Amino acid sequence: MSAETDVAECVAELREEPGTPSRWVIWHMSADEVVVFDRRLNIPFDVDEKVLGDVLRRLREAGTPETDAYPGRPCG
């Protein structure tokens, strides 16, 4: 086994998806409606329209996942 292989094996887990899904998701509810969704509470998080753009930018920079599909658990 080469030194390159050893290094690759040591950092392999960094390339894998985490075991638990992110709490926050950017959800594209429709073509013109984007919300921040809280998976823990299973509801959209209320963000004031005045700051929504900045919040979305920061979440994207942090690597928050985005989806067009409903990101929560079934209700009921």
Image (cartoon, helix red, strand yellow):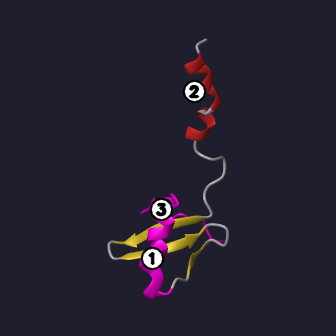
**Residue 54 image label:** 1
Which segment is the magenta one?
A: 48-76
Left or right of 47 on screen, residue 41: right
Element type at mark 2: helix
Give 27 or 50, whichever is nearer the viewer.
50
Give 2 or 25, whichever is nearer the viewer.
2
38 within the magenta span: no
Do the residues under discs 1 and 2 have CB atoms within 8 angstroms? no
Left or right of 13 on screen, residue 66: left
Residue 29 rendering spot, x and y as whole percentages = 42, 72
Question: What amino acid type should be assigned to the residue bearing mark 3?
Answer: Glu
Question: What amino acid type should be assigned to the residue bearing mark 2?
Answer: Ala
Residue 14 rendering spot, x and y as whole percentages = 60, 40
Element type at mark 1: helix
Outermost residue on the top side: it is: 1
Residue at the image point whose x is 61% and y is 33% from the top:
11
Callout 2 crowding tier (Cα within 10 Å): few <14, some 14–19, many ≥20: few
The residue beneath circle 2 is: 8
> Mark 1 and mark 2: span between their CA atoms?
36 Å
The residue beneath circle 3 is: 61
